[in-house]
Amino acid sequence: IIFNSAISACEKAGEWEKALQLFSALLQTQVQSNIISFSSAISACEKGCKWEKALELFDAMMQCKVECSTVTFGAVISACEKRGKWEKALELLGVMVQQAVESNAITFSALISACEKGGVWEKTLQLFSLIKQNTVELDTIIFGAAISSCAKSGEWERALMLSGVMA
């Protein structure tokens, strides 16, 4: 509990390096790491724009057979989104579906934003359709990211179509 609290505090303070030092120290002890310690360390990497490190921790979490949550997936997908790694973000969505982990508006916003940065408006529209099939509520952030993705790719007609759906 002490390690988890300290890692989480570092994550909230944007101190990703300190969070990783604490996580590393946790692994050296007899205390077993859990979803909270992994998720906090991954979130710290996401906030520090260290997507590769976030993926390393996610892979380690999978190898340790620690169950992943919506928060965990959201953090690692957001880390990929910040660096425009849309392919990896979509791959993580596939893992999320395989593991039957529920997605939410934050997850889809990060996915659409990653596709926007990658200039793949077609993937954005596929995600938009997937959202409508799920129980995820469409919000202005999701609409804005989808419209921006289409507009930046020169797909103004699709951007207008999405604007009409939102109204």
Image: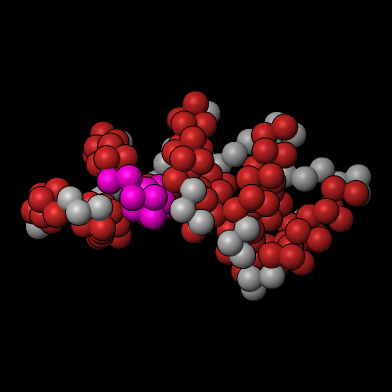
Q: Is residue 121 above or below residue 166?
A: above
- Residue 116 in view here: yes
Q: Residue at left 51%, top 56%?
A: 83
Q: Is residue 132 above or below residue 38?
A: above
Q: Residue furthest front?
A: 154
Q: Is residue 101 above or below residue 78?
A: above
Q: Residue at left 14%, top 54%?
A: 156
Answer left or right for 151 relative to 91: left
Q: Quadrant of the C terminus?
A: bottom left
Q: Residue at left 69%, top 46%?
A: 57
Q: Residue furthest top?
A: 98
Q: Residue at left 68%, top 55%?
A: 41
Residue 125 part of the magenta-drawn span: no
Percent of width and height locating residue 21: 81, 61
Q: Nearer the viewer, residue 96 or 56?
A: 56
Residue 115 part of the magenta-drawn span: yes
Q: Nearer the viewer, residue 139 or 47?
A: 47
Q: Is residue 128 above or below residue 39?
A: above
- Residue 9 in view here: no
The residues colored magenta run: 109-121
Percent of width and height locating residue 11: 65, 65
Q: Nearer the viewer, residue 55 or 29?
A: 55
